[in-house]
Image (cartoon, helix red, strand yellow):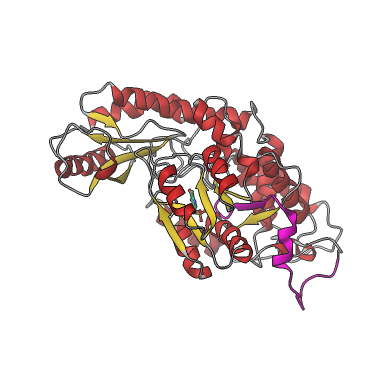
Amino acid sequence: MKLERESLNLLQKAIEKLESGFDLPDLDQSYDSKKMEEVILRAAEKMQDNYPYFHPLFAGQMLKPPHPIAKAAYMMAMWINPNNHAMDGSKASSPMEKEVVADLAKMFGWNEHLGHLTGGGTMANLEALWVSGKIHPEKKIIASDQAHYTHERISEVLKLNFDKVATDHQGRIDLAALEEKLKKGDVGTVVCTMGTTGLGAVDPLDKILELQTKYNFRIHADAAYGGYFKLLTNLVEHTKNKYSVIDQVDSIVIDPHKQGLQPYGCGCVIFKNPEVAKFYIHDSPYTYFTSDELHLGEISLECSRAGASAVALWATHQLMPPVVNGQFATDLEKSRSAALKLYEKLSSNENFFPIVKPETDIVTWGLKGKCTSHMSELAHAFFKKAEENSLYLSLYKYPTSKLNNPDFDIDSEYLVCLRSSLMKPEHEDWLEEIWDRMIASL
Ligand SMILES: *Cc1c(COP(=O)(O)O)cnc(C)c1O
């Protein structure tokens, strides 16, 4: 069997349990089930036209299947369809959301915080930069040239000045370049990416905190992808050092729908200082009847949101809490060691060369050749050949100006490389198979 089905049995039991909690007269619920079956089978057939995102041979873009418990819990909640905007529409799932956000805050070292789930990392980052803009309205947002492109666009939406800072050849913020910008005194917030989307590189947060003592600015950690690496014991020392001071930033974004085994629609923003709630306060004529506590809708920019996301994450945390040495962390450690193993293989092979040493679980490599334009063509051809061998990778454009001591000619602005996000727990066991298919694709 290729697709997981255990969650179907769980779901059946969970719905029976849920139903037994409502003492109401039965409903007459007859649908045209014949027609429905015909339609759903057509939908399934259409969905066959996809890459196999759930399979370890899909080792390209960041796609990780939700855990069966998350799927079952999400669907069970769909039978109620709570809206985590206000307590009235989500009596059970709003408190569950508060619980999971507190778990994540605690993972980062915060006992006190203000935070909530969001539709995704983009919305979560938007809220973090919105608060930054409220605190430093005239000042700039700075992010690296490897930060997610969303920061530049969000700044545009928020009408905040935005500037990019250069990175070193490992894809991390260049500290000298950052200090040059800070000296001008017009920087309000530095976005520190804890795990870039491209290379999985972690910005030097420990050093940025040192700069903060000299120049006053906020720090927002975009850990949408890399936040859970905080739990790992098999990171290199300098990466560990960066994660160990993440509690000193002002805000953090983490995406449970990236590494956290959740269905899409689950991001999270957390602020260190709960007083930022004051920026959100508004009067709503519609929604709040039942409680004096802050409703989630009073501390978030989005209004309606799937309560099911909170239920799914809550169930996942119950099964696999985000703690050091827990099952979840151990699985992520496997992804990390898969990345290191692939890196070793690439380093000792005559046809490939790694672009950087992986800091998290993303590996990037080029194909050897005489000049960068030809090497880019080789990469495109390899990518296609791999797909024919049912190995799904992704492509990545690396600026040739950042290449470290190249022994080939540079005749293009970018070098097209291969990129592999080894984020599934099975990737370590599948690495030999992936490697064999890579060799067969040369
Ligand atoms: C994915 C990602 C985002 C955007 O988040 P979405 O959930 O796709 O909206 C932002 N920053 C980083 C570092 C990311 O990896």
Question: Can you give x and y, in whole percent of width and height, for residue 351 in the image?
Answer: 21, 28
Q: Which residues are magenta?
A: 262-290
Question: Can you give x and y, in whole percent of width and height, for residue 413 in the image?
Answer: 22, 49
Q: Is residue 381 above or below residue 127?
A: above
Residue 204 relative to residue 88: left or right: left
Q: Is residue 344 above or below residue 404?
A: above
Q: How many marks?
A: 0
Question: Can you give x and y, in whole percent of width and height, for residue 331 in the image?
Answer: 55, 29
Residue 434 relative to residue 29: left or right: left
The quadrant of the picture occupied by the C terminus is top left
Residue 370 relative to residue 342: left or right: left
Residue 254 is one of the magenta-drawn residues: no
Residue 287 is one of the magenta-drawn residues: yes
Question: In percent of the image, x 69 and y 44: which residue is there?
Answer: 105
Residue 9 makes an appearance in the image:
no
Q: Quadrant of residue 433?
A: top left
Of residues 179 and 71, the one nearer the viewer is 179
Of residues 201 and 285, the one nearer the viewer is 201
Residue 47 relative to residue 128: left or right: left
Q: Quadrant of residue 117?
A: bottom right
Of residues 324 and 159, the one nearer the viewer is 159
Question: Can you give x and y, in whole percent of width and height, for residue 155 in the image?
Answer: 49, 64
Q: Which residue, as the protein is rendered here, is positioned at the far top?
A: 348
Question: In percent of the image, x 64 and y 66: which residue is there?
Answer: 301
Residue 17 makes an appearance in the image:
yes
Question: In percent of the image, x 46 and y 62: which residue is there?
Answer: 162
Question: In percent of the image, x 43 and y 38: which residue is there?
Answer: 55
